[in-house]
Image (tube, rainbow, N blue to C red):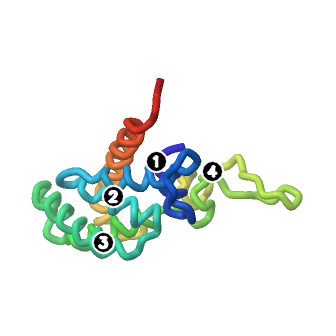
Amino acid sequence: MGIIAKYSRAVQSSNLRDDAQHHNTEPLAAVALSGGQGVLAIGNLLFRTKYANDATSYPELLAKWKVIVASKAAHRKWPRHIVPAKVAHMSLDHFLNDVCPVCTGRAHVPIDNGGRAVLSDRPCPACQGTGTKPLQCESNWKDYILDMVESLNDITRSAADVAMRKLARDMDLP
């Protein structure tokens, strides 16, 4: 089970005891401590907002993400008509709500098989089999927004990697 599944399960747990049978506090602590320096500092905020559905973390996350995007825009010399704050807002919103509504992220549309739903062999027509909904924006903004969405994915992967390494250190391996 990956860190995202462990974290999501821990956040939804009604029992956060930490004993021989219960280990839900470990993923929470690992993610909380996964923040790094610079851009990676928002990793735990991304986890809380996306996987724990913690809407109270959104304003802080957006404010920090706007600063990061503005820095990237200045460094990469974006054109004047591309507003970094708007790119930050749109990229973060797309990242947090990227599941295709048609296939619910499964990349294939469910079909009815005699009262039982099974997945079709053909890719979902709405997302072309990616499981993520297409970005809806002006065409001249698309590359900038998608680049920042990929940056958010990279930050999340890095934070997950740090959290998994913290969990691995605590495991009793022979």
**What number is the disc on residue 89?**
3
Q: Quadrant of the N terminus?
A: top right
The residues bearing labels 2 and 4 have C-alpha atoms spaced at a distance of 33 Å
Q: For marks 4 and 1, give the one nearer the viewer.
A: 1
Q: Which residue is mark 2?
A: 44
Question: Does 30 sit above or below residue 91?
Answer: above
Please tell me whether residue 21 is drawn above or below residue 138 in the rendered image: above
Q: Earlier in the sequence, mark 1 or mark 2?
A: 1
Separation of residues labelled 3 and 4 (CA atoms): 30 Å
Q: Residue at x 44, y 51 (%)?
A: 27
Disc 3 to disc 2, C-alpha distance = 18 Å
Graded by Cα atoms within 10 Å as few (under 14), some (14 to 19) or many (20 or more), the crowding at tag 2 reads: many
Compute the Cα span from label 4 to label 1.
27 Å
- Disc 3 marks a residue whose amino acid type is His
The tag on residue 158 is none
- Residue 170 picture quarter: top left
Q: Which residue has dot 4 on it?
A: 123
Please give the name of the residue rendered at 57% of the width and 57% of the height, measured from the top-left corner.
Answer: 105
Amino acid type of the residue tagged 2 in the rendering:
Asn
Q: Position of residue 79 (x, y in %)?
A: 15, 64
Instruction: Determine which quarter of the picture holds residue 73.
Output: bottom left
